């Protein structure tokens, strides 16, 4: 199936931006009732179930926030970037009800705790904390997620989710990126640079 992938340069691990992006990713693609899944899969039938993924790859220096959408055959794929930008714009305007935010925090909390029940995942988390140079990163992760506010989400969304900041890829018989989507910044260049 055809697929879109969007990447935007994000802040390093352990920053307030890192935790806000984890929550934003869950608001957008954390389950069947999340914003992008509802719009792309349920309402507009542009993507198939399981075809919308978001992850924040927090790193020691700059990280990368990814949005991946695998389109449905026969769908108007030009609508995928339009819908994505509409949902990101909603975040910029502060339209995150407390109940929805709490749901996202709970999903992150549960998935983090559940993943640590397996010794391999716990070892990876400990090793990653050391590599990041943040020994308390995973020990304090769920508390930091719990402290993300609607204001944090608005601030991070306004700083990062500008069309010209995204690097866009389209696979399988690709077309040009939809109007309004930029080609991204050179590697290592932040929006404030």
Image: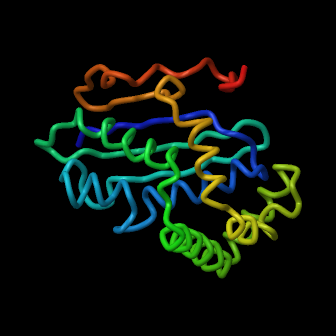
Q: Position of residue 57 (x, y in %)?
A: 62, 47
Left or right of 154, for residue 145? right
Q: Nearer the viewer, residue 59 or 36?
A: 36
Q: How did the renderer colour the structure?
A: rainbow
Which residue is located at x 19 percent, y 47 percent?
72
Q: Nearer the viewer, residue 131 or 13?
A: 13
Image quadrant containing the C terminus: top right
Which residue is located at x 42 percent, y 53 percent?
53
Q: Position of residue 151 (x, y in %)?
A: 64, 54
Q: Position of residue 11 (x, y in %)?
A: 71, 40
Q: How many marks?
A: 0
Q: Nearer the viewer, residue 11 or 132?
A: 11
Left or right of 53, for residue 26? right
Is residue 109 positioned above or below 148 on the image? below
Which residue is located at x 81 percent, y 58 percent?
129
Q: Position of residue 26 (x, y in %)?
A: 51, 61
The quadrant holding residue 171 is: top left
The quadrant holding residue 43 is: bottom left
Which residue is located at x 52 percent, y 55 percent?
25
The quadrant holding residue 1 is: top left
Is residue 25 positioned above or below 178 on the image? below
């Amino acid at each position: 199936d055809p697929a879109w992938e969007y990447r935007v340069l994000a802040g390093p691990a352990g920053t307030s931006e890192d935790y806000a992006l984890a929550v934003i990713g869950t608001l957008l693609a954390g389950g069947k009732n999340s914003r992008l899944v509802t719009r792309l899969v349920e309402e507009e039938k542009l993507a198939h179930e399981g075809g919308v993924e978001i992850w924040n790859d927090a790193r020691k220096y700059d990280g990368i926030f990814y949005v991946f959408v695998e389109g449905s055959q026969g769908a108007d794929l030009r609508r995928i970037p339009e819908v994505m930008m509409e949902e990101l714009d909603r975040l910029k305007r502060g339209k995150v009800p407390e109940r929805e935010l709490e749901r996202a925090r709970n999903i992150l909390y549960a998935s983090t705790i559940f993943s640590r029940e397996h010794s391999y995942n716990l070892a990876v988390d400990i090793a990653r904390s050391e590599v990041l140079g943040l020994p308390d990163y995973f020990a304090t992760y769920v508390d930091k997620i719990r402290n993300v506010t609607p204001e944090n989400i608005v601030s991070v969304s306004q700083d990062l989710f500008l069309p010209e900041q995204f690097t866009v890829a389209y696979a399988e018989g690709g077309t040009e990126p939809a109007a309004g989507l930029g080609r991204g910044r050179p590697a290592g260049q932040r929006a404030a640079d």
